[in-house]
């Protein structure tokens, strides 16, 4: 019993910090909202991308090394990082002229 409680105490701080590093992006009107997110450098991040449009969009980023389709009226989860300080651009491959954004790691 004590061993289980001890192990849970070790795990709980990790669970709370994971929630602190969760960020939301919305696709609406063929745009990312917000189009810029400031995130901590050197930490793993969870991005929840929700597509509110009637058509699919693709989240793509060369610097983040990610490419994933976000179906219409659906959400996806992306894990990225730890990121080096600086700007990390992303875009929607289907509406590249309007669906653009950036993560700024500080």
Image: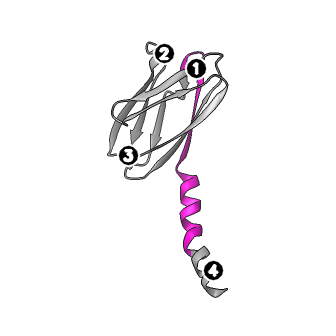
Disc 4: which residue: 4
Q: Work out whether mark 2 precedes mark 4 in sequence or the reverse, and give the earlier one.
A: 4
Position of the N terminus, as image quadrant, is bottom right
Secondary structure of the residue carrying numbered label 1: loop
The image position of residue 64, as x and y in percent, is 37, 37
State how far apart marks 4 and 1 are (Cα): 45 Å
**Is mark 2 in CB contact (under 8 Å) with mark 1?**
yes
Q: Using the rendered view, name the quadrant where residue 85 is placed.
A: top left
Q: Residues within 10 Å of mark 4 (few under 14, many from 20)?
A: few
Secondary structure of the residue carrying numbered label 2: helix
Name which residue lies at 66% across and 16% down: 54
State how far apart marks 3 and 4 are (Cα): 37 Å
The magenta-colored residue range is 10-31
Disc 1: which residue: 56
- Indicate left or right for 56 with 37 as reference: right
Q: Work out whether mark 1 precedes mark 3 in sequence or the reverse, and give the earlier one.
A: 1
Q: Pick whichever, 42 or 38, lies toward us.
A: 42
Disc 3: which residue: 106
Which label belongs to residue 94? Answer: 2
The image position of residue 15, as x and y in percent, is 58, 61
């Amino acid at each position: 019993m004590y061993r289980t409680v001890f192990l849970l105490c070790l795990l709980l701080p990790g669970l709370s910090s994971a929630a602190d590093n969760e960020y939301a992006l919305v696709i609406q009107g063929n745009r990312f909202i917000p189009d810029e997110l400031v995130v901590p450098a050197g930490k793993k991040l969870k991005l929840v991308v929700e597509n509110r449009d009637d058509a699919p969009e693709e989240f793509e980023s060369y610097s983040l090394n990610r490419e994933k389709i976000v179906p219409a009226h659906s959400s996806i989860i992306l894990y990225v990082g730890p990121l080096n300080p600086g700007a990390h651009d992303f875009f929607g491959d289907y509406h590249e002229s309007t669906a653009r954004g950036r993560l700024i790691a500080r």
